[in-house]
Amino acid sequence: MRFDLLVPSGGNLDRICQLFRSVVQQTILPERIVVVLDKPRDQDEIEHFLYSLHKTLGKAASRLVLVHHRNSDFEAEQGVGYVRKYLLSQATSSYVYMIDDDNVFDETFFEQTGKIYQEIVGKIGTECVLSPTILLRKTGQVQSQGILGFASYLFPKYRFQQLTDQPW
């Protein structure tokens, strides 16, 4: 399954590097890693941010696309809904993972969730949006990741429902 990883970021370099360390350890890597930097930065800050991301990603750095207010029509500080909608417009693969820059996960996360997705699609007979209601992060924190309201806003012609109340 080919997919893009879409990451909204406020620019916290420590957090996003921690995420990228967990990404490069995955058994399956995304085709592209698109990061939208949602804080105005001067050119030196952007270059330092990009250098640090490339260093963290290593061989996977060629997959990185960094979008910010200086290299695109993106407008910083317009809110999380705007950022996520903009990220979706940048996707080129048929499938996407939209993951906040403060998440980390086990090395089989993409592989296992891809299998779960295929299993669910096989059962229901149609494509779907898969979003865990609760994501237990390696940081020991539990965070709501449900996107039912957000997905309904972005795609009003589709009907969204929660398939389970249990975390994957």
Image: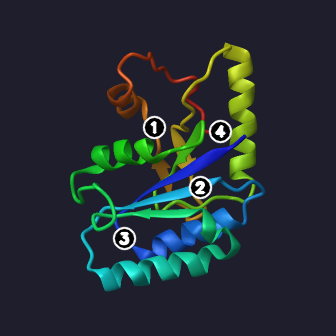
Looking at the rendered structure, the kind of residue marked 1 is Gly
Helix, strand or loop at disc 4?
loop
State whether residue 115 is above or below residue 22.
above
User: In front: 26, or 29?
Assistant: 29
Q: Which residue is mark 2?
A: 32
Q: Which residue is mark 4?
A: 168
The picture quadrant where one finds residue 58 is bottom right
Q: Which numbered disc, 1 or 3, marks the residue that appears first in the sequence?
A: 3
Relative placement, left or right, of 67 versus 19 is: left
Do the numbered discs 2 and 1 sit on residues whose CB atoms are within 8 Å? no
Give the number of the mark in front: 3 or 4: 3
Quadrant of the image containing the C terminus: top right
As drawn, the label of residue 131 is none
Q: Which residue is mark 3?
A: 11
Do the numbered discs 3 and 2 sit on residues whose CB atoms are within 8 Å? no
Q: Which numbered disc, 3 or 2, marks the residue that appears first in the sequence?
A: 3
Residue at image position (70%, 56%) is: 29
Q: How has the structure been colored for display?
A: rainbow
